[in-house]
Image (tube, coloured by chain):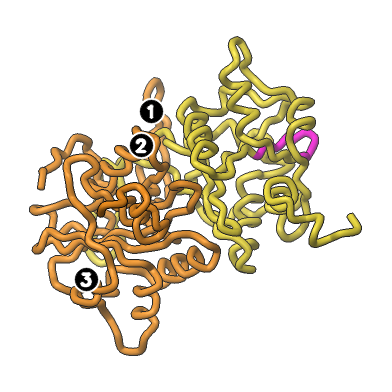
Chain colours: A orange, B yellow
Amino acid sequence: MVHYPNKKKDLTKYAPHEQKRYTGMRGMNLEEDITMSNKYYLERDIAVIYKKPTPIQIVRVDYPKRSAAKITEAYFRKPSTTDYNGLYKGHYIDFEAKETKTLRFPFANIWDHQINHLDAILRHGGIAFIMIAFTTLNEVYLLDASYMIEKYRSDGVRHIDYDYIKEKGHLVTQGYAPRLDYLRIIDRYYLKEEENENPKK
Amino acid sequence: MVHYPNKKKDLTKYAPHEQKRYTGMRGMNLEEDITMSNKYYLERDIAVIYKKPTPIQIVRVDYPKRSAAKITEAYFRKPSTTDYNGLYKGHYIDFEAKETKTLRFPFANIWDHQINHLDAILRHGGIAFIMIAFTTLNEVYLLDASYMIEKYRSDGVRHIDYDYIKEKGHLVTQGYAPRLDYLRIIDRYYLKEEENENPKK
């Protein structure tokens, strides 16, 4: 995996509720990979998918003369929804992305209202999933939100095992561009298009 | 129009590039009205539409002991996309909302890349529009993005007149709940559903 240089001095990713994600940073950076992939999709006019900005409550702003407004007091807010959404081939796409160093995805990484949000997306005809990066294995899976919602709402279940994700989810192909070709999975398993385009496969 | 009490001390709306919008604040507050309407749609499980958080570049964060992380230096960023997006009856919805005190909508209120974004949404099969509030008239119109894009890209045109918006757009019904029933316009003019539901109309 390529290491992305930290070009901008932006600590947005260090919001307390997001810190857990970056524990596997040495090997891979899921957020950066998705951002690069979305940029690739956007530039080639394949899809319009963005990460939502981190929600922040602004309390104090200075307006210095002849320079940009400076926020001097603000706090992180819990996100109401998931991190990513957008449009692909007429379909509404919505997902959350998480890294884990272990061989399980712990529900401590996800909020109740994010689960409810993904459920609402499915109910209203959108495509909803979670992308889970197992950083020690260097594998990323796309798991339909329905599986996660079911597990999350089961009594006593506080995580999803790697084996279950491997069974029910789809391994995302990694490459140079796009880094994570997750829309290929949407084509193949959600829109059932792959077979027609590549009949020999 | 109801005046909304300013419950939370949150200055997010005063981002420099957003200030123009709130000039008509005495009479109406479009953002607040849309937020209330989206909340109404969400609670009744009609649609899942949210305002995106204001994009902010965080430079410095303090982590005081036993209290929440405090952002002490941050700056407003230009938004890459529009303010609102979501899902309604399986359709991807995307829009920008602006207020004007005059009888024209000046393009100074909108960014180049927002126009390109709306264009991409139309190209990929989404529903894209702008909601324009004429605060002195207390009227809100929904105008399909295609009209705005065409005008925006015409040489020498730097605004859209009220008359044109009235002709090509649709007046949004105002009420108690939802405050702005803009999805009714989507039903009627985009999904062509109204006639079946109310055959006598």
Q: Chain of mark 3?
A: A
Disc 2 residue type (three-letter): Tyr
Q: Secondary structure at mark 3?
A: helix
Q: Which of the pair A112/A44 is nearer the observer?
A: A44
In the rendered structure, the answer to whether residue B139 lies left or right of residue A21 reads right
Lower position in the chain sequence, tag 3 or tag 1 = 1
Q: CA distance from mark 3 to mark 2?
A: 41 Å
In the rendered structure, the answer to whether residue A187 lies left or right of residue A3 reads right
Residue B51, compared with residue B44, is above or below; it is: above
Residue A177 seen by the camera: yes
In the rendered structure, the answer to whether residue A44 lies left or right of residue B131 reads left
Disc 3 residue type (three-letter): Lys
State which region is magenta: B131-139
Q: Which of the pair B27/A31 is nearer the observer?
A: A31
Report the residue marked by disc 1.
A68
- Point out the image quarter for the C terminus of chain A: bottom left
Residue B56, compared with residue A28, is above or below; it is: above
Q: Residues within 10 Å of mark 2 (few under 14, many from 20)?
A: some
Q: Are marks 1 and 2 in contact (CB under 8 Å)?
A: yes
> Which residue is depicted at the point 80% across and 62% down?
B197
Q: Residues within 10 Å of mark 1 (few under 14, many from 20)?
A: few
Residue A166 — which label? 3
Report the residue marked by disc 2.
B75
Asked which quadrant contains residue A96, the reply is bottom left
